[in-house]
Image (cartoon, coloured by chain):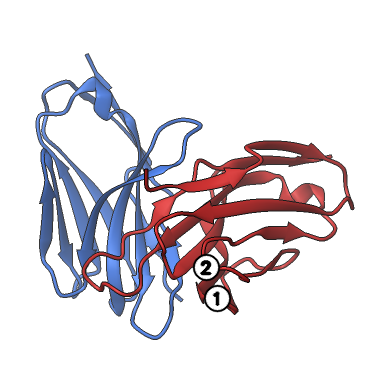
Amino acid sequence: KQEVTQIPAALSVPEGENLVLNCSFTDSAIYNLQWFRQDPGKGLTSLLLIQSSQREQTSGRLNASLDKSSGRSTLYIAASQPGDSATYLCAVRQASGTYKYIFGTGTRLKVLA
Amino acid sequence: EAQVTQNPRYLITVTGKKLTVTCSQNMNHEYMSWYRQDPGLGLRQIYYSMNVEVTDKGDVPEGYKVSRKEKRNFPLILESPSPNQTSLYFCASSSLRDSGNNEQFFGPGTRLTVL
């Protein structure tokens, strides 16, 4: 059974620092992996989607990478800002033939001004 | 504006009183899904639908029903709610036609309390 883990559960960094958030999954047979941001009491906002055939995706200060063979994805945030403070979630969609999604429990990020 | 809407946003009810949470999307997406979010457990998938009249169970379907009679709507039904169904519920949708653009879009959430 697919399990998705995000470590650390919480992280505090000073403003301006570059940081990496980690997402690990146990079954490499995935269709895609998506990174989300969730602000307190709010819904999820999609950040980046990586298909299983891709190695990375970039959007502005964000870069997500995928290494299926090792069961890992990283979300790199450059020059962090206080507005980046939120919980970051990753989700994997199982390989073709099923439409199930498995979420990690998230990393709560705080960027200090 | 492309969006997923849910109603109600907040609901307090009592054990056993049937309720329905509505979900609607205006993006013509084939795929729709329901999740619940609980502290320490993250988001868990309840049910999903690949198209009209096609639904399947997620990881935590017990105590819930869904229907997909129209492409845009995917209501979540709790026939006899219990306190352990107190949670934050999210509806999501995505396209299945475009394999390069099938990111999930989420609704704002429904906070349900069952007394």
| Amino acid found under the numbered disc labelled 2 | Lys
Q: Which residue is mark 1?
A: B52
Query: Callout 2: 10 Å neighbours few (<14), some, many (20+)?
Result: many
Residue nearest the viewer, comparing A88 with A69: A88
Chain under callout 2? B
* The disc label shown at residue B97, or none: none
Query: Callout 1: 10 Å neighbours few (<14), some, many (20+)?
Result: some
Residue at 37% over, 43% down: B1
Chain under callout 1? B
**Residue B99 screen position, x and y as percent:** 25, 73
Q: Is residue B70 positioned above or below B25 on the image?
A: below
Q: Is residue B11 positioned above or below B51 on the image?
A: above
Q: Is residue B106 positioned above or below A112 on the image?
A: below
Residue nearest the viewer, comparing B64 with B76: B76
Rendering quarter of residue A45? top left
**Residue B82 screen position, x and y as percent:** 82, 52
Q: Is residue A62 left or right of residue B69?
A: left
Rendering quarter of residue B87? top right
Residue at 45% over, 68% down: B31
Q: Is residue B85 left or right of residue A13?
A: right
Q: Which residue is mark 2?
A: B71
Q: Which chain is blue?
A: A
Task: Name the residue at the top extreme.
Answer: A113
Mark 1: secondary structure: loop
**Residue A67 screen position, x and y as percent:** 16, 67
User: Is there CB contact under 8 Å for labels 1 and 2?
Assistant: yes
Q: Which chain is red?
A: B
Q: How many marks?
A: 2
Rendering quarter of residue A76? top left
